[in-house]
Image (cartoon, rainbow, N blue to C red):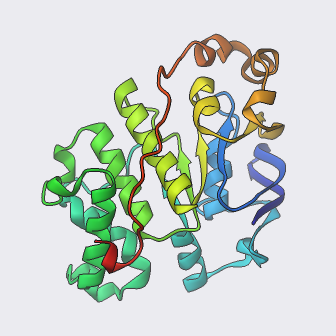
Amino acid sequence: MLVVEGLTCRFGTKAAVDNASFSIAPGGFVGVIGRSGAGKSTLLRMINRLAEPSEGRILFEGQDVTALRGRDLRQWRARSAMIFQQFNLVGRLDVLTNVLMGRLATVPTWRSLAQLWPDEDKAIAMSALEQFDMASIAAQRADQLSGGQQQRVAIARALVQQPAMILADEPIASLDPRNTRIVMDALLRINKHFGITVICNLHSLDLARTYCDRLIGMASGRIVFDGAPAMLTDQIARELYDLEADEVMDVAPGHVPTHSPIPAFGTAAAA
């Protein structure tokens, strides 16, 4: 169980996130919605501890995440894997090595620097790539991939961290409609078949309603809506998005996600 209590992040006199409180049970697919500048990215970065809270606490399975330091903090960041809008891959490295970067918390620094990855880690990374039909390009440089391919590599990298949750910060913002569906389907498969909690910042209301089982709406750093997608009426959405309402409500995914079975993941045997 993830519990956020009175979480606040200030930059000078401005509160990017203001007194946010909520809890998320394991296995949920939660969409964080709201207009640009509402505080969505800062919220996710605080949960991962990439941004420091000014006030409040983050608890996970009873552990105070806001108090973690050093090795414990690195392990938490592995358990709460981040996926970024701009992929954050190393372009000159091949796809497999980029995915293996998700294993950094489990191997000595000298091994990663020398790229002497254990065979078990290589098997885990290849298994993750196979989940997303990417194994055939494992040796290709990351900067030669399309945006959709790069984001799937980033998702595979997050998956090999064997996280308890995945925090996706606008993962489809720079993608075309086809790759948007592919990436959202990939996140949904991770959620449904591995039981990994997904918290995903989304700009499109239609995508949020299609993929998420719960929505948290933010405005000016505060949580102003928290409930099932069906509870988010068009009137509430227009109040939430204000001048951006027409933009986010006119985008239709035109797609119903499918949940095809995929093999178990997380051990070398799964490769």
Q: Viewer-proximal residue, 137 or 133?
A: 133
Task: Say above or below: 223 vs 137.
Answer: above
Q: Quadrant of residue 56?
A: bottom right
Q: Viewer-proximal residue, 44 or 138?
A: 138
- Across and down, in percent, residue 168 comes to 53, 49
Task: Say above or below: 14 vs 34.
Answer: below
Task: Say above or below: 248 vs 202.
Answer: above
- Across and down, in percent, residue 187 comes to 48, 48
The residue shown at (42%, 67%) is 264
The residue shown at (45%, 70%) is 161
Q: Viewer-proximal residue, 261 or 213?
A: 261
Direction front: furthest residue: 261
Q: Is residue 267 left or right of residue 252?
A: left
Q: Quadrant of residue 108?
A: bottom left
Q: Is residue 33 left or right of residue 172?
A: right
Quadrant that contains the C terminus:
bottom left
- Across and down, in percent, residue 97 comes to 24, 67
Quadrant that contains the N terminus:
bottom right
Task: Say above or below: 249 vs 82.
Answer: above
The residue shown at (82%, 53%) is 22
